[in-house]
Amino acid sequence: MDEKAVAPVPPGPASVVFGDALPLAVEFAERLAAAGVERGLIGPREVERLWDRHLLNSAVVAERIDSGARVVDVGSGAGLPGIPLALARPDLDLTLLEPMARRVAWLEEVVGALGLTVRVVRGRAEEPGIKQRRAGADVVIARAVAPLDRLWGWSAPLLRQGGRLLALKGESAEAEATRDSAAVSRAGGGTPRVGRCGVGVLEVPTTIIEVERVGVRPRTGVRGRRQRVSRQDQGH
Ligand SMILES: C[S@@+](CC[C@H](N)C(=O)[O-])C[C@H]1O[C@@H](n2cnc3c(N)ncnc32)[C@H](O)[C@@H]1O
């Protein structure tokens, strides 16, 4: 293996997406290509597609997030999508959530080296302590963490009413959104919508599934049962 793997030169859209933070994005790419590969955070074959498939693909999700929003990256791993998003959008209040100690150590190092004001938290999204401390987020972002129904179950308690999950997905997004729509709705989510980020900027825009937290149906008790019966009676 080439231990001195060098990240490819940033493609044209990188300066549009990262603006003044481009030198820091280059440093992140270089760290991923060298230490990131050595420490098993990304596979060696990812080096040649670091920009398109990882950094840019992650950062363009910024277009769906309001200024100053409170954002949690669930299952951040090597820092994706959270670190590119933090570079592109320093106004965000961003938390990188990751359970594995080795990856948390990496995230803390990278955040320190790049001088980012980003919180790194060790834990699982579904842990009571995490739900307590991180609840009220405007946006949860996640890539390659879990199927939509499970991911929504972890995300909903972290979101405020009206907050949104932005799940970065691949080609199966439409099928996954349809498949998990009922489960998401039972757990307080709106209809999952598939969208594209980075259209007109990236050669291959990022596909996302977006779900809004709209409320949780009562699951137990007389009131909940009566409501369910009356819905069925009405043919809903
Ligand atoms: C396949 S990796 C993806 C990492 C990164 N998001 C990316 O796209 O490169 C999945 C990550 O989710 C983390 N993870 C798994 N279950 C989790 C949970 N319940 N809460 C938070 N993170 C979780 C894993 O430790 C791992 O770092």
Image (cartoon, grey):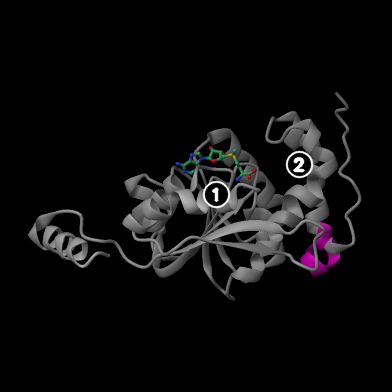
Which residue is at the front of the view, 172 or 212? 172
User: Can you tell me whether the CB of the residue at mark 1 lies under 8 Å from the nearest atom of ligand 1?
Assistant: no
Whole-percent x and y of residue 67?
Answer: 59, 76
From this viewpoint, is residue 180 visible? Answer: yes
Start-end of magenta stretch: 14-23
From this viewpoint, is residue 90 visible? Answer: no
Q: Which residue is at a point 82% across and 68% down the rendered structure image?
A: 16
Q: Earlier in the sequence, mark 1 or mark 2?
A: 2
Instruction: Using the image, determine if residue 158 lies above or below residue 76.
Output: below
Q: Which residue is at a point 37% across and 51% down the rendered structure image?
A: 183
Label 2 crowd (10 A; few <14 / some 14-19 / many >=20)? many
Query: On the image, which quarter does residue 132 sit in?
Result: bottom left
**Magenta stretch: residue 152 in it?**
no
**Magenta stretch: residue 17 in it?**
yes
Q: Residue lying furthest top in this view?
A: 1
Q: Main secondary structure of the magenta part?
A: helix
Q: Amino acid at mark 1?
A: Ala
Secondary-structure class at tag 2? helix
Distance between the alpha carbons at the discs numbered 1 and 2? 32 Å
Query: On the image, which quarter does residue 161 sit in?
Result: bottom left
Whole-percent x and y of residue 35?
Answer: 76, 35
Residue on which disc 2 sits = 32
Whole-percent x and y of residue 115?
Answer: 69, 58
Horizontal side, residue 121 vs residue 87: left or right = left
Q: Residue lying furthest bottom in this view?
A: 67
Whole-percent x and y of residue 162?
Answer: 42, 71
Horizontal side, residue 55 vs residue 66: left or right = right
Mark number, residue 175: 1
